[in-house]
Amino acid sequence: MKKLTIILGLILLGSGTAVAQEAASPPGGLEKPQAVSLWNENFRNDDYKRALRFGRWIWRSMPRSFEFWPGYELEQHMGRFVTIYTTLAEQAEDPSIKSAYVDSVNLTYGKVFNEMKEDEYDVFDWRVDYGRFFQNFGDVIENSLPKAAEQYTLAMERDRQRLIDEGEGYYVRAIVLSKINEGDEDAALQMMDELESEVNQQVADWFDQQREQLFDTPEERLEFLNKQLSEDPENVELLREIRSIHRRQDNTQEIARINQKLYELNPSYENTMALAEAAVGNAENERALELLSEAMEKAPDDATRSDIALQIADIHYNQDNLQQSRRFARQAAELDPSNGDPYMRIGAIYARAVSNCTSGRETNRDDRAVYWLVIDYYQRAKQTEPSLASQADAQIDRYMSVAPQSTDVFMRSAWEEGATLQINGDLNECYSWINESTTIRLYK
């Protein structure tokens, strides 16, 4: 993963481009007209790597116009970047390099969809082209057909008849096939029924073939699919479709067996998480921790890794391993600074610490001082993620009622409103591992 990140960084920066260079500036101190001329010349000569060096700044800044270039259109040049990265991906022999160029194509489409207005480019064409990209790189991109079908569906929402006519119904068939492969047979049947009168005869005949395979009962469908699987036991798409039927029937043993088979064929993030979630559901805690740790290493981004870290924190919390639970909650916060859930978890961890430390004895004001720190974390949760405000406020109200009150503060000569208080072994040895500070405050 580290190697791939470095490669992608180099590809995105372009050969010879300094990291500290201004994002919107041409390389090497060139004036924009000079850089544009070299960009155009090298692209026309198919010298794509050199073209990137002189055109990458256009990708970064996405200028809408140039005074010296009346015929410039941003859509055309973003299309060039798709062509460049796609071609370089096709030519790459090293899988890591190929994957990095594929990521660059994804980033380019993302910039077009997210940063350009709909009147600045042909949305329909770009959605269709993006779908074809997913299909063309199915050996690199997981779930390529569903991703392609999503783009074709978005294109159909823009112009229904145009998508039906494009490619003699190719894209419509791709959407239907994706629904069937995902086990959403009802949606596939509904779509075919809706489009029956609008497609040509060839596509209508294909619809009929698909309907014949969508049997009346799940048992008939399973029998058919299992027969196909016996002839091709490593067919991942068949395994997934069989699993989807078993999920609808809640056949947990069969689901577990197929999840294990898919993992053995390809221990990808998706397949690892399927096993991990099953282990969590079965309270197989050690197995779940092992698989979640493995999935975290394979996760596609930091936000996903943050969510996994929280799942690990929850398992430790449920086992009363509070220090380990806090460790992974903190890791979740570091991975996704916009996520307030880790702070909610830490608040709960410290509240549990008070319960554990006072088990079998009366809770005193030193114990209840920990609740100030609990409140701090719930405050931090809603500040980080405002959507958590209602949930956090409910916890704040709860712990304000049991935190030290004004009389408790006055009874402790060392406590003064607004002063800092260390939550550690000075309060009680049981809290030594917390080792954080809070603020003394007055309630009531």
Image: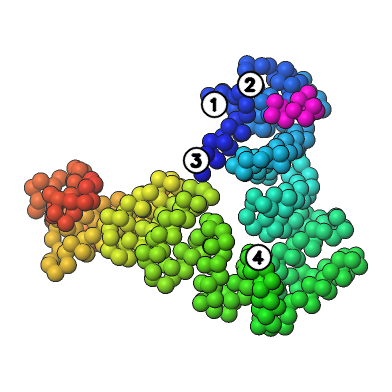
Q: To which quarter of the image does residue 208 belong?
A: bottom right
The colour scheme is: rainbow
In the rendered image, residue 46 lying in the magenta stretch gets the answer yes
Which structural element holds mark 2?
helix
Among the two numbered marks 1 and 3 on one chain, the one whose residue lies closer to the N terminus: 3
- Amino acid residing under circle 4: Asn
Mark 1 and mark 3 in contact? Answer it, CB < 8 Å.
no
Q: Looking at the image, is mark 3 or mark 2 nearer the viewer?
A: 3
Q: Residue at x 58, y 80 (%)?
A: 249
Question: Which residue is denoted by mark 1 in the rendering?
Answer: 19
* Quadrant containing the C terminus in the rendered view: bottom left
Question: Which residue is denoted by mark 4 in the rendering?
Answer: 235
Among the two numbered marks 3 and 2 on one chain, the one whose residue lies closer to the N terminus: 3
- In percent of width and height, residue 181 lies at 69, 67
Q: Is residue 99 visible?
A: yes
Task: Give the distance between the C-alpha atoms of the residues marked 1 and 3, in whole angstroms.
Answer: 18 Å
Among the two numbered marks 4 and 1 on one chain, the one whose residue lies closer to the N terminus: 1
Q: Nearer the viewer, residue 145 or 268?
A: 268
Q: Residue at x 40, y 64 (%)?
A: 287
Q: Looking at the image, is mark 2 or mark 4 nearer the viewer?
A: 4
**Number of residues whose C-alpha sits closer than 10 Å to that of mark 4, classed few (under 14), some (14–19) or many (20 or more):** some
Query: Which label belongs to residue 283?
Result: none
Magenta span: 40-51
Query: Which label belongs to residue 27?
Result: 2
Which structural element holds mark 3?
helix
Mark 4 and mark 1 in contact? Answer it, CB < 8 Å.
no
- In percent of width and height, residue 419 lies at 19, 42
